[in-house]
Image (cartoon, rainbow, N blue to C red):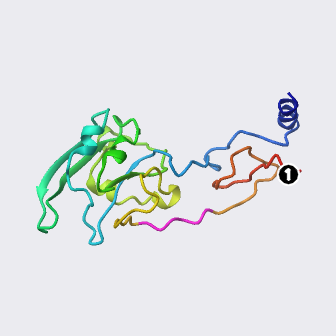
Amino acid sequence: MGLTINRMMDNLTGKVNATIRYPEERRAYSDRFRGAHILTAREDGSPRCVACYMCATACPADCIYIEPAEHPDPLIEKYPARFDIDMLRCVFCGFCVDACPEEAIIMSRESELCAYTREETMWDIKRLMSRPELPEFGLGYRPNETLVDSTIKFVPKEKEKKELAGRITLKEDVEMIPHVTFDPTKD
């Protein structure tokens, strides 16, 4: 009961404010956050996907469409000539990521998806492989922390830390853009 009263007093006096002022501040998401999809690439820049249909089969929303084609390299059986994800139908469950045997599809921490038309929400292979907004959000859910033999064309952006006057947010101890953390153990 004492903890509840202390938290209530901190909130009433303004010592702690659990509200985030979006878009100046953004919530810090876990590395396992299931955001927008990313297609990884091989060293030569071609998609890592082998068009096995496992992600499309595992998808409960049936939002992944793949058309296979023969790969010129005899060591690679096939590749996706077309790989589309309907982002309006996607439920961001991560089943496609779990099903992929090649780690060709992973998720980012991007949660801000917007479009003016329905066609903009149909992400093709080019949109899935070249993601200019990735440095801002970072990688999200993937089976292995290190991507085996894969490349993603981005350099993570350093998050600038700036203090907002009189503003402390009650969050878990993780990076935020911008962020000020409150540690209840320190006084």
Q: Residues within 10 Å of mark 1 (few under 14, many from 20)?
A: few
Residue extending furthest toward the top: 1
44 above or below 164? below
The quadrant in which residue 147 appears is bottom left
| Residue for point 11% across, 67% down | 72
| Residue depicted at 20% across the width and 46% down the height | 66
Quadrant location, the N terminus? top right
Q: Which residue is mark 1?
A: 186
Q: Report the front residue among 165 and 15.
A: 15
Query: Label 1's element?
Result: loop
Q: Is residue 67 above or below residue 131?
A: above
Quadrant in which residue 65 is drawn: top left
Q: Residue 52: within the magenta? A: no
Q: Which residues are magenta?
A: 154-159
Q: Position of residue 2 (x, y in %)?
A: 88, 31
Most prominent secondary structure in the magenta stretch? loop
Relative horizontal placement of residue 14, taking residue 178 as reference (left or right) = right
Decide if residue 12 is on the left or right side of residue 35.
right
Residue 10 point in image, percent of width and height: 86, 38
How far from the left and from the top, in percent, is residue 50?
A: 21, 56
Q: Residue drawn at (82%, 49%), measured in percent from left and top?
A: 166
